[in-house]
Image (cartoon, coloured by chain):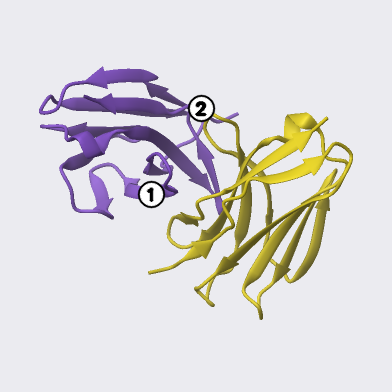
Chain colours: A yellow, B purple
């Protein structure tokens, strides 16, 4: 069983702060890693993906990957109330294996 | 650009009734298609995936089935729904490694 683990939260951060979301995975052979955002009652939408160790930045979002530690994270800088959502970590198999998600609440 | 559509968006069904959820993809050919379910308090569970017409792989043995009668059409069915079938059903297609979801179908079984 390929496991993807996330802290369910909720993670509460004040507006303007950095939100840090973490994910660990069990399959050492995994090659690709994805972060999705899911608003309540809506389908998940892709935020970004990362394939290589290190950091990848896209606007206010930074994904970090450490394959040796089997750890991937998502940083959201200058958090906004509109960032309040559940963030899903996903790891490649023949499909994507998803974690249960971390609920993020950004308070004004 | 590619788009994916699901319907119906919401449905309430009694236990033991049949189910049919439909998904179509536009703007691409021979897509890999997936059905996921998201139950309350649980993560996204892969139910079925298909790499082509008539080719279905099942991940979880249960009372659900899937069919792919056309290249860009993927159907999820059940002959008799159970209470445990309630959830948010998501169809998705895959481009390279990325997965893109439809709007979802929320099923409540009473």
Residue occupying the point 30% across, 18% down: B11
Callout 2: helix, strand or loop? loop
Q: Are marks 1 and 2 on the same chain?
A: no
| Viewer-nearest residue: A77 or B4 | A77
Residue B41 image position (x, y, % from top left): 43, 44
Tell me the quadrant of the picture where the N terminus of chain B can be found.
top right
Residue occupying the point 39% across, 33% down: B88
Q: Answer above or below: position of A40 versus B94.
A: above
Image-quadrant location for residue A104: top right
Residue A41, numbered circle: 2
Q: Residue furthest bottom?
A: A68
Residue B45, numbered circle: 1
Residue A63 image position (x, y, % from top left): 75, 57
Image-quadrant location for residue B64: top left
Residue occupying the point 37% across, 28% down: B23
Check the residue under mark 2 and report the chain it is in: A
The residues bearing labels 1 and 2 have C-alpha atoms spaced at a distance of 17 Å
């Amino acid at each position: 069983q390929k496991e993807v683990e996330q802290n369910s939260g909720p993670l509460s951060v004040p507006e303007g702060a950095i939100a840090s979301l973490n994910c660990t995975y069990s399959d050492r052979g995994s090659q690709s890693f994805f972060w999705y955002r899911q608003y309540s009652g809506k389908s998940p939408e892709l935020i970004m993906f990362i394939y290589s160790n290190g950091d990848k930045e896209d606007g206010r979002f930074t994904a970090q990957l450490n394959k040796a530690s089997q750890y991937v994270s998502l940083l959201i800088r200058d958090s906004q109330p509109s960032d309040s959502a559940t963030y899903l970590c996903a790891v490649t198999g023949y499909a994507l294996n998803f974690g249960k998600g971390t609920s993020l609440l950004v308070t004004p | 650009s590619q788009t994916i559509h699901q319907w119906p968006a919401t449905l309430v069904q009694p236990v033991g009734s049949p189910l049919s959820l439909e998904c179509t993809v536009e703007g691409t050919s021979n897509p890999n298609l997936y059905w996921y379910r998201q139950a309350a308090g649980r993560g996204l569970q892969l139910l079925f995936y298909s790499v082509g017409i008539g080719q279905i792989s099942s991940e979880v043995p249960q009372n659900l089935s899937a069919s792919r009668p056309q290249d860009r059409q993927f159907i999820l069915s059940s002959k008799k729904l159970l209470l445990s079938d309630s959830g948010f059903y998501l169809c998705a297609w895959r481009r390279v490694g990325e997965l893109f979801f439809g709007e979802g179908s929320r099923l409540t079984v009473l």
